[in-house]
Amino acid sequence: MQRSTTDHIVVGLDIGTTKIAVVVGEIIRGTVEFRGMHAYPSAGMRKGIVVNMEEMILSIRNALQEAGSAFDVDINSVYTSITGSHIKGSCNVGSIGIGGREVASADIDRVFDSARAVYVPLDREVLHVMPAGYAIDGQNGIRDPLGMTGERLEAKVFAITGAATPIQNLLRCCEKAGVEVADMVFAPVASAGAMLTEDERELGVALVDIGGGTTDILLYKDGWPIHASVIAVGGNHFTNDLAVGLKIPVDEAERIKKCFGAATQMVTDSEQIEIIPFGQKRTIYRRHVAEILQARTEEFIGLIEKEFPSGSSCESSLTGVVLTGGGSLLNGLDKAAEEIWGLPVRSGDSIINIHGIQGPENSGACSVGAGLVRYGFEESSEEFSPRDAVTGIFSRMKAWAKEIFKIHKGGIEYVRN
């Protein structure tokens, strides 16, 4: 059987602390269909940062080779995720005069280019520049100013930047593993494309993507992103607490967490479970597991809450939270978060924006990979408009050695300080 080429294939490479997920999508009649996901253990990464390049390269290479064989495709290009506490979000505003006439398409392009003049220091790189709304003569909340009249047109963008060194190291790992990186995407930006509804973005939602070593937070209001941050705590910390508290190996602690773990005291006092520490079976009360996880859960939820922007405007804009990522699958975590935050919390256990995902793969654990496929499909679509979605600028990082102090790429200006 002839292997599929990359002409109609989009591959998302979600590189995490505990696993590498390769999600393969296929473009069929103008839509993207899920073809399969393959997970492989990750080595050489800690809290979103590459700490051993050789191990990371081997992990990526093996994951891609096994996925290519499993789904009968040649994988030459991928859209890959990135996270880490070095990633930050910020807003920028540009404005132009329009002299009382109707706003034309050229005016929108011009003001958007002005807003996208993102200033970054030498040690940082811009990952995304996303539209975040327009205003005419101080009137905010305008989604499309085309045809409106006024004296001054403003455009706001939301920029996501990261430290240059970890970005470059991850890029080099992928390239040495034998695959071209079409674009590098902040993990919750990808997750949002797979998990959030338009209504949630409009009303105001926080997407909380819980990975193994990090938790990524991305807030939306009125359809626009307004805040992004990362905390260096994830599902592995729950596992480590169990390993220490029960005096069992980490692998056994992970099994106990997945099979019997609960974020709250939602188990009976008499229920018992069997654990296998170092090859010898013994029985413990399940409530001991719940007690350990509950303590970590309360601390964890508090850390996330601190990342929600303070201030009356931000607090009133947040009407719900969506939990996703493999760490969000802990039993009762959504209920515990809802009680502490006083907000509706939805567990993102169903991917809504890519067709064909069924069974256990249709869960938060696959959300970043599926979102990367969706992102790649939108970038490759002829109808894709940069004003309507995320603007990636990753091509500039591929020309690292050619950088100068002032560079124009795709209408975006970057000035080094």
Image (cartoon, rainbow, N blue to C red):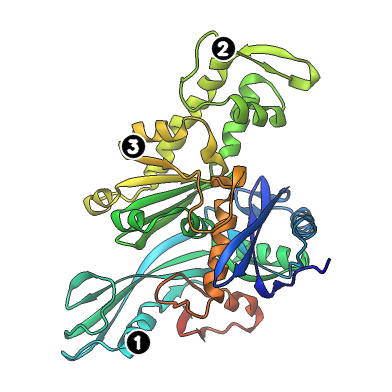
Label 3 with label 1: CB-CB less than 8 Å = no
Q: Is 105 on the left-hand or right-hand side of 63? A: left
Circle 2 or circle 1, nearest the eye? 2
Report which quarter residue 58 is drawn in: bottom right
Q: Is residue 155 above or below residue 283?
A: below
Q: Depth check: 96 or 25 in front?
A: 25
Q: Secondary structure at mark 3?
A: helix
Q: Where residue 347 sits in the image (x, y, percent)?
A: 45, 41
Q: Residue at x 78, y 53 (%)?
A: 55
Of mark 3 and mark 2, the one earlier in the sequence is 2
Q: Residue at x 40, y 35 (%)?
A: 337
Q: Residue at x 39, y 47 (%)?
A: 307
Type of amino acid under label 3: Trp
Report which quarter residue 167 is drawn in: bottom right
Q: CA distance from mark 3 to mark 1?
A: 41 Å
Q: Specify few, some or many for label 3: CA neighbours under 10 Å numbering under 14, 14-19, or 20 or more.
A: some
Q: Secondary structure at mark 2?
A: loop
* Outermost residue to the right: 1
Q: Is residue 115 above or below residue 345?
A: below
Q: Where residue 147 sits in the image (x, y, percent)?
A: 23, 85
Type of amino acid under label 1: Arg
Residue carrying label 3: 341
Report which quarter residue 132 is drawn in: bottom left
Residue carrying label 1: 110
Type of amino acid under label 2: Glu
Of mark 2 and mark 1, the one earlier in the sequence is 1
